Image: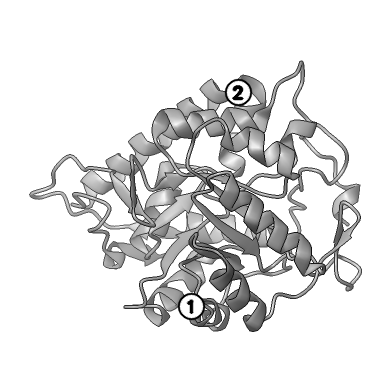
Amino acid sequence: MEEKIKSPWPGPAGLIPVTSGRADDANVINRHYLDHLMVEMRVIDSVEPDLTTEILGRKFSSPIMMPAFSHLNKVGKDGRKPMQAYAKAAKEMNLLNWVGMEPDSEYAAIVDVGAPTVRIIKPFADHDVIRKQIAFAEAHGAFAVGIDVDHIAGRDGHFDIVDGQSLATVTSGDLKRYAESTPLPFIAKGVLSVADAVKAKDAGCKAIVVSHHHGRIPFGVPPTFILPDIKRALAGSGVAVFVDCGIDSGYDAYKALALGADAVAVGRGILSPLLKEGKDGVVKKVRRMNEQLKEMMMYTGIADTHSFDPTVIHHS
C-alpha cells in the first residue's frame, strides 16, 4: 500500500503522493515508456527555434506550463508559500499557471500573484460546491477552470473522500452543464482514453489534460502512448490537448509535443527545487527545460511550436 512507502516529501503521509515502484504503478510504466521513445535527427536546414506558444487564445513564452499542485502551502517552512512561489515563477517567465484543490481564500491569494491561472476543481458529490468554486474562479479573474474527472475511486473501491468531502463520477451531462455555466474555457483533466476525450469534446470542453494524475489508476497507460489516438479523434474540433505525468525534462516535453500535445505541464520535476529554493528554483528548472526543448527542436528541424512532427519519434 502507498501509505507504507517512506515519503521523501515533507508534510503528513499522503499529502504529496509517492511512487510505489511496483509493477502496477503507472508512474513506473510511464517513465519506462518515455525513456524508450527514441528521436531521429533532421539537422540539415535547421534553425534556432521559437518557443512562443498560443494556449487558449493567449501567447506564452513556452509550451511548458506549471502543474495543478494542491495543498503545498501546508508544507512550506518559515512562512513560505510554495503555491504562490511557483505562481511567481509563472508570472516572471510568462507561463500558464495551474492550481489544484485549494480553499477559496488560498486560491485568491495565488491568483493575486498575477500569473494567468487555471483552477482545477475536484469532482465533489455536492455539485453546489463545484458551481460555487467555478463562480469564485470567474470573480477572481481565472484564465480557465476545469475539473479532475479521474479522481473518483479510493483504494478501498469506494468513492474517495478528500478533506472530508465525498467525490463522485462526473457524467457527460455534468460536464456539459459546467462548461455551459461559465464564460471561461472549461477543461477536463485526467483523460486517458479516446472515449473520454470524445465525451469531453461533445460536452463543450475547450481543452483536456491527458493524464493519469500521478498514477491514480493501477497499470495506467502512459499519456504519451494514448496521446496520438486522442489527437486523431479530436482532429478539427478545436479542443486543445495538454499532457502531464513524468514531464521532468525538456526532452520529455519534446516527446509529448512531437506526439501531438499542444502544451505540457511539469509536475514532480519542479517539486524539489520549489520546496528548496522557492520561485528561483522553479525558474532555474524551467529555464533548463526550455534549453533542452530547444536543443531537441534544433536537432530535428522544428522551427516553432506549430511544426512538431510525430514521425521523428520511434519506440525502441
Pick the front one: 21 or 46: 46
**View extreme (front): residue:** 139
Q: Position of residue 193 (x, y in %)?
A: 56, 77
For the point 71% across and 44% down, the residue is: 70
The amino acid type of the residue labelled 2 equals: Gly
**View extreme (left): residue:** 45
Q: Dot 1: few (<14), some (14–19), or many (≥20) neighbours within 10 Å?
A: many
- Mark closer to the observer (1, 2): 1
Name above or below for residue 219 compared with residue 52. Answer: below
Disc 1: which residue: 201
* SS state under label 1: helix
**Location of the C terminus (image quadrant):** bottom left
Q: Position of residue 65 (x, y in %)?
A: 47, 45
Distance between mark 1 and mark 2 Cα atoms: 37 Å
Res 122 visible: no
Q: Is residue 10 left or right of residue 157?
A: left
Q: Position of residue 262 (x, y in %)?
A: 38, 59
**Location of the N terminus (image quadrant):** bottom right
Res 103 visible: yes
